[in-house]
Image: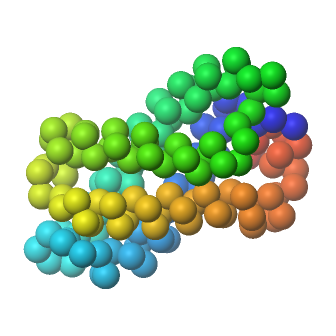
Amino acid sequence: MIPTLAGRLQTRIFVLATVGALLTALVVPVLPGRPGSLGMAYRTAFLMLLAVMAVGLVWELLYHLLMQFRWDKDWPTLFGLVTMVPEGAVMWLLLNTGLVPGVGDHVSASMFVTMFVVVWLGQWLFLNGPMRVLSVRWRLRGGRLL
């Protein structure tokens, strides 16, 4: 069963709120170029994660539109991994232009790249591994969690 748009949106929120939050909490203390105190680094990192989640919902709408041109209406797994590049580039532009509320302009490139890649790969691996094993019905209900 191909995930529905609602299922893709729910899945993105769920995985970023769980796996993404856990990975963010683990990686922040070792981030290169983190701003000031550890508390400030956590604040910035979780605001970035929230921004990735919000912008990701818009990405899902675009991906859904593009998938309508594919015969099976779904992405190959590799496409899901490669989408890290345009999503990361857009997030970096939003951060650099100050369009992410509360973050300002104090995010270093090394901090952003490290956090984004760790969280993105972690959530992608979770979706393509444990999520498929632990939640078989998730795929059968079109990706909807509820």
Q: Position of residue 51 (x, y in %)?
A: 35, 45
In the displayed structure, 11 sits above or below 119; it is above
In the displayed structure, 128 sits above or below 83; it is below
Residue 63: which quarter of the image? top right
The residue lying at 55 percent from left, 47 percent from top is 82
The residue lying at 29 percent from left, 75 percent from top is 31
Left or right side of 20 for 139: right
The residue lying at 54 percent from left, 62 percent from top is 121
In the displayed structure, 77 sits above or below 59; it is below
Residue 129: which quarter of the image? bottom right
The residue lying at 50 percent from left, 58 percent from top is 120
One can see residue 108 in this view: yes
Which of the pair 15/127 is nearer the observer?
127
One can see residue 18 in this view: no
The C terminus sits in image quarter:
top right
In the displayed structure, 123 sits above or below 30; it is above
Left or right side of 100 for 71: right
Q: Residue furthest bottom?
A: 30
Which of the pair 102/121 is nearer the observer?
121
Which of the pair 81/31 is nearer the observer?
81
Instruction: Say how the picture is coloured.
Output: rainbow
The N terminus sits in image quarter:
top right
Which of the pair 63/22 is nearer the observer?
63
Q: Position of residue 133 (x, y in %)?
A: 83, 64
Q: Position of residue 34 (x, y in %)?
A: 19, 71
| Number of numbered discs overlaid on the protein picture | 0
